[in-house]
Amino acid sequence: MFRTLVSLALAFAFAAVALQASAREVLTLERALALAEQHSPRLRVAIQQLEGARSGVVTAGQFPNPEVEALGGRQNARMTGAPEGSVQSYGIAQPLELPSVRAPRIRSAEAGREAAEQGATEARAALRAAVRQAYYDVLRRRGEHELAQEMQRVIDQIRRRIAAAVEVGEAPRYELVRADAEALSAANAANSARLRVTQAVAALRAVVAAPLPADIEVVGDFAPVRALPPVEALREEMLARNASLAQARAAVRRAEARLESERALRTPQPVLRAGVEIEPDTNKFRVGVAIPLPVWNQRGGQVGEALAAFHEATAAAEARRLDLVTELENAYSRYQVASQQIAAYEGGLLKQAENALRVADAAYRFGERGFMEVLDAQRVLRTVRTELVAARFEQQAALIEIERLRGADSERTGS
């Protein structure tokens, strides 16, 4: 009975340990994107700017409020027989807004709302691109760390062989000294690679901006990459769909509407007035229109400021278009170069390096070559594998940048 209870207790303990190990929180790309959209302060800023722009449209459509006036006093007689008593005056004034002023103001607010919408879209796209870049950088650094660990294991194995040979007198002592130096160098390289993994994970946590546990595990692999259309087609699609360019164009329309509104305000805006005066012996009713005279202020400065803002927005939109074209061409070139490197590595260089290592290791086992030749072959293989990992990262990073620029939904690309 006691043994049965002990067995059950151990079984429950092992089950709890296994459950705790399996419950370790993992971070996939999809979860990282969802957490970033939920917690990113930059995205919240863009959303609040959009809410403010929407309220601006409501403000632009509001009519001016009327003014109500009420006065009271007393009338005293200065002549014999003149009436005396209280005097009251009531009036109302309603500013009349001309359509030439109201319409462009509303168009300016609507253009501002559209610019804010495109800004929020651009902020979301930039955030998702940054998360993807940081996520794939973790995969890249992790791959480099695994290669460094593998190199360290190989050198440790060779060192043990050399130590055994030196102990029995089959190899000189300086061979072990060289092997110790190589083992120390490999250990330092592995530690440096591990540090880069830690830094990449920290960068990913910063981009996600969500409260994640310290032992979070990033899981996943590089996404399959499909062929891209010609750069000319991508350029046309980008110019038609890019959110930042649409935001700049909306800013141009907003500045143009503001300029039109400032010019329309040169025309005096009338004010409709009506009132009544109640005196001891008479009642007076008045209705009229008040028109301000543009004598001292003819809005020359306001029109000049609006015109300068319009030219500035136009130039900024053109500059943004040129910058986007340059960014797309650079990203496309990076994508092509990385794709060519991957094809070269996977097409023969990787297999050649693996075969060279096998030949060198076999020759070393039979005493035909020294351990330095094995290390050189191992270094070549590690270099090829590391560059292959780097090329895959560069290809994925370039694709992410292209998808962000063209305004495409990255979910469709499988990335």
Image: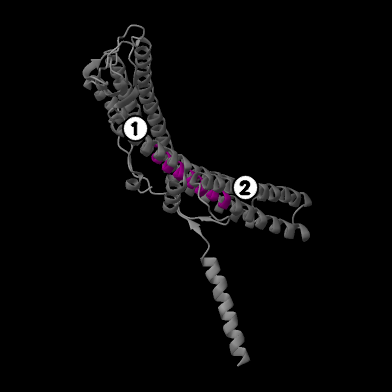
Q: Read off the residue under disc 2.
A: 195
Q: Name the foreground residue: 155 vs 47.
A: 47
How is the rendered protein coloured? Answer: one colour
Q: Image quadrant for the N terminus?
A: bottom right
Q: Name the foreground residue: 204 vs 298.
A: 298
Span shown in magenta: 122-146
Residue 395 lies left or right of residue 91; in this view the side is right
Q: Is residue 181 magenta?
A: no
- Alpha-carbon distance for marks 2 and 1? 49 Å
Q: Position of residue 297 (x, y in %)?
A: 36, 9
Q: Position of residue 27 (x, y in %)?
A: 48, 55
At x 29%, y 19%, the residue is 261
Residue 181 drawn above or below residue 316: below
Q: Is residue 71 visible?
A: yes
Residue 129 drawn above or below residue 367: above
Q: Position of residue 376 (x, y in %)?
A: 61, 45
Q: Residues within 10 Å of mark 2 (few under 14, many from 20)?
A: some
- The kind of residue on which mark 2 rests is Leu
Q: Read off the residue under disc 1.
A: 56
At x 32%, y 14%, the residue is 77
- The kind of residue on which mark 1 rests is Gly
Image quadrant where residue 123 sits? top left
- Farthest bottom residue in view: 1
Residue 377 lies left or right of residue 240; in this view the side is right
